[in-house]
Amino acid sequence: MKKYVISLDSGTTSNRAVIFDQELNIKGIAQQEFQQIYPKPGWVEHDANEIWQTQYKVLQDVFDQNQVTPEEVAGIGITNQRETTIIWDRKSGEPVFNAIVWQDRRTAEYCEQLKKEGNIDKIRQKTGLVIDAYFSGTKIKWILDHVEGVRERAERGELSFGTVETWLVWNLTLGRLHISDVSNASRTMLFNIHSLEWDDELLNLLDIPKSLMPDVVDSSEVYGIVHSKVLSGNIPISGMAGDQQASLFGQLCFEKGMVKNTYGTGCFVMMNTGDQPELSSESLIATIGWKIGNNIQYATEGSIFVGGALVQWLRDSLKIVQSAPEIEALAQEVDDNGGVVIVPAFAGLGAPHWDQFARGTMFGITRATTPAHIARATLEAIALQVKDAIDVMKETSGLEIKSLKVDGGASVNDLLMHIQSDLLGIEVVRPAITETTALGAALLAGLAVGFWKDLNDIKNRWKVDRTFSPKPLKNHDEIVRYWQKALDRTKNWLDN
Ligand code: ADP
């Protein structure tokens, strides 16, 4: 009797295994952190073996701690930190180098060169992406160019490349499967999001042998089973998606115009754009959401660098709150921001403004300014950044946006959700299960094995915690106008 689906949620700092039942309740979670390696400023690596070992450990733990047996599991879904790049030996399974993490900037200079050589439009049209060190392509090239003997071995066809889901499946099947799903493939800067194939021209441009590349598969289908030496029970591996795409799916944003935002350290806004990529905006990237059978859904994405991190700064540096949740009560002490506007451009501005020379600012301070005004302005700053990204999505796609689905650590803040709803003029919907990334991977896996019949079956079981309807904020227009003014004065702050 199959009672559960398991999601492997392989994040940037920790790996988790989450058991879901058919009613979409969480039956159990196991989690383990792994080491962050910083060899030089701007470089970030993980030990690929440690990623696999901690993921395997939490998978075993989640069974043991919840008295669940592999025989009760209908399928395993995987969601993962995206773009992080691993190359390993096909025979021994040994990585040839540490995993180069998405945050790693070591290829930034090469990316500038690619831009100067006139590749911006070509890469945008083919992959939906801007040229950036963030994506896997230039990281692969770096390993081939810098690790001794690797290029020769790659040219002899002895090596495999994968992002983290590829690596986990390889290990779960003891090397039988070398696959990546379309959503993860679309983050490599090497994948043609129209033809759904590795792009020969881009592989040539970056001088990457095609033999390295995994087979690209759908986001929800039975790829194979977990090898019996790894786990008993013949569990199918049947769903995969990158973390943000999995969250979009877990938020049930199945139709075009549906949007979700994750309020974590940063904010990740994603909108379903239907069966066509939206390539007209230069400030957002286009990506594949998922593919299930013949149904492909594209998405646009905006990353905002500082979201909940602004609250952390109030807590850890200004010390005007002792814990993040306290900010809500503090901000409630006043009924407006008292003229204070904060632009949290701690590390420049991300989507949709993209200004690496901007730095954080606080405007409008008077002798009457209190910590409560700063708290209020903090919540407004988070919501205004999200609004700006969604406004661009709306303009460029021409789609009507009816509501915003929310998750992430700061989404528990009711005042923030109220401010967000008012500023956007739409409903903000917070689900009962905010573990939407893990849920999305579980849903993709469960759909493929018939654990859930179809999307309607899932919709009927998905529960809302709370819906926030737009209610006028005091000084709404002023907030928006002064935010715009503050942004203009913040941009291009540093001397280039
Ligand atoms: P990540 O996955 O990026 O580590 P989380 O989703 O765990 O982030 O969210 C943590 C962030 O949310 C922190 O930056 C924290 O400051 C913020 N946060 C947590 N609770 C609240 C709250 N009640 N109000 C506002 N921000 C909060």
Image (cartoon, grey):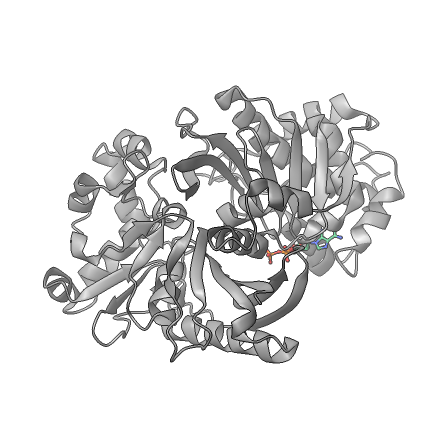
**Is residue 199 placed above or below 180 in the rendered structure?**
above
| Farthest front residue in view | 1
**Residue 295 in which image quadrant:** top left
Q: Nearer the viewer, residue 55 or 136?
A: 55
Give me the residue at 16% from left, 50% from top. Answer: 207
Give me the residue at 71% from left, 36% from top. Answer: 428
Q: Position of residue 339 (x, y in %)?
A: 78, 31
Residue 157 in view (yes/no): yes
**Is residue 491 placed above or below 178 in the rendered structure?**
above
Q: Nearer the viewer, residue 489 or 384?
A: 384
Query: Image quadrant of ligand 1?
Result: bottom right
- Left or right: residue 179 versus residue 483 is left
**Is residue 179 placed above or below 496 in the rendered structure?**
below
Q: Quadrant of the N terminus?
A: bottom right
Q: Position of residue 112 (x, y in %)?
A: 29, 41
- Left or right: residue 40 versus residue 310 is left
Q: Position of residue 468 (x, y in %)?
A: 78, 36
Q: Position of residue 252 (x, y in %)?
A: 59, 41
Q: Quadrant of the C terminus?
A: top left
- Left or right: residue 294 versus residue 470 is left
Give me the residue at 22% from left, 69% from top. Answer: 90
- Left or right: residue 277 versus residue 265 is left
**Residue 291 in which image quadrant:** top left
